[in-house]
Amino acid sequence: MRKTKLHDLVVAGGRPAFDEKLHVGRPNLGDREKLMQRLNDVLDRRWLTNAGRYLCEFEQRVAGFVNTKHCVAMCNGESALQIAIKALGLKGEVIVPAFTFVATAHALQWQGITPVFADVDPVTHLIDPASIRQLISERTTGILAVHLWGQPCPFRELEDLARAHGLKLLFDAAHAFGCAREGRMIGGFGDAEVFSFHATKFVNSLEGGAIVTNNDELARVARMMMNFGFVGFDDVRYVGMNAKMNEFSAAMGLTSLEAMEKFISLNERNYQLYRKFLHGIPGVRMLEYRPSGRFNYQYLVADVAPQECPILRDRLLDVLWAENVMARRYFYPGVHRMEPYRTLFPDAAIRLPNTERVCAGVLVLPTGETMAPEDIERVCEIIRVSVQSGGELMRLLEKSPCRVHRDMTR
Ligand code: T4K
């Protein structure tokens, strides 16, 4: 159903714009037939996991694509982060952005390392080197920066800071596969970088992650750690864990990799359509990407500015969910406001003003291969009508609050 006026909206008595839910992380699938061939081959050969053929091919292709000496693929991005952190020998305190997915901080806290939260740039949402500088202490052993939304971090400043203070530099590149800055692919920065290939990522292996690095020793240690610490059949040298990627995941990862360029161009098309259809709506803007980079556009990030937009971001989310548009307010309320960090650092918000502001404004919109151009136009119509109806809509929502974003049904 098209939306042109307040009473067309579900919250004002209309019918939903979409019969089916539109999701932010709807997986891209790639060539199904090729995937099925690979899965059958895995079953025929009865080699299901533990350094299988598809895993080795996936690692080689990822390393070749991002131009690093090593790729160590694992069962998910958070495990890969944990192993990278351990293999790098981080301890004490590590500086991380407060505006990220909670896995970034958990990967440290899980092994008794204190995440120290830095603020972010209010425009790019990336970690702010000036904030990091103020947080470096005698206990700091590293910086764990995040290429948020696939935008490369300010790597020169971060490399200078790490060098000047003798710190390790690790990048959480969960959002940034296929991205580049100034001609350098994400993957080769710092001591190591970590990708996620979770189902919701534009290249996915169902669940999956990887450490990429040019450091031979780091790759060797990481490979042991993710296989219980084994070197040979009977020789264990480290406290390891089981973080191996299985063959079905690797088969999916390869199939997804082969369709990557198609996914990027669809995501970019979707991004440009959102920009076009949201243009001129007061206080609602799409994230702008720097011209010098290559991006995967897998997260379509809008910002709803409270001073300019007559409707609050959270009320807009209520309206969208009622229409079956499952937009997300990633990464609300900020890692520093989640447990255990909220209790450990009750005053953190005071020195994170940009994080607080960004958390209150971000709205991530559905994209991926299942979104047709007319779907995007209709999502934007809902936003336009909501903003145009501003005060009246806010009063209506106050009378019959419809906090649908708390309903997690799929
Ligand atoms: N670092 C950063 C910066 C990250 O963003 C992440 C993960 C990590 C590290 C850790 O990497 P992994 O260990 O996950 O490999 C999702 C993803 O689970 C997570 O991978 C991702 N970041 C995060 C940003 O988003 P949730 O809790 O929002 O997922 P969920 O289940 O609500 O799904 C998101 C949307 O996708 C929903 O609208 C439903 C839809 N969906 C999801 C799945 C799994 C589908 O349509 N189909 C599906 O199969 O965390």
Image: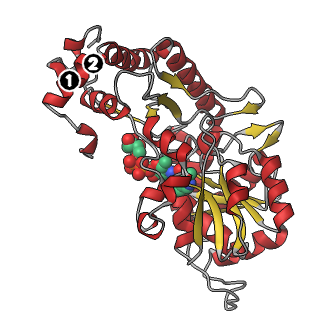
> Going 73% across and 57% down the picture, which residue do you hit?
133
Determine the residue positioned at 72% across, 50% down. Answer: 129
> CB at mark 2 closer than 8 A to ligand 1?
no
Q: CA distance from mark 1 to mark 2?
A: 6 Å
Residue 391 is tagged as 2
Q: Is residue 236 visible?
A: yes
**Residue type, label 1:** Arg
Tell me whether circle 1 and circle 2 mark residues in contact (CB < 8 Å): yes
Residue 42 in picture, x, y percent from top left: 55, 59
Is residue 283 shown above or below 211? above
Quadrant where the image shows the N terminus: top left
Percent of width and height locating residue 370: 44, 29
Q: Quadrant of residue 338?
A: bottom left
Residue at label 1?
395
Q: Is residue 380 left or right of residue 294?
A: left
In the image, taking residue 395 as reference, residue 253 lies left or right, namely right
Taking 228 as reference, is 374 above or below it? above
Which percent across, then down, holds residue 326? Answer: 34, 35
Task: Give SS at disc 1.
Answer: helix
**Residue drawn where x is 34% and y is 12% of the image:** 388
Q: Quick one: 186 or 242, which is closer to the camera?
A: 186
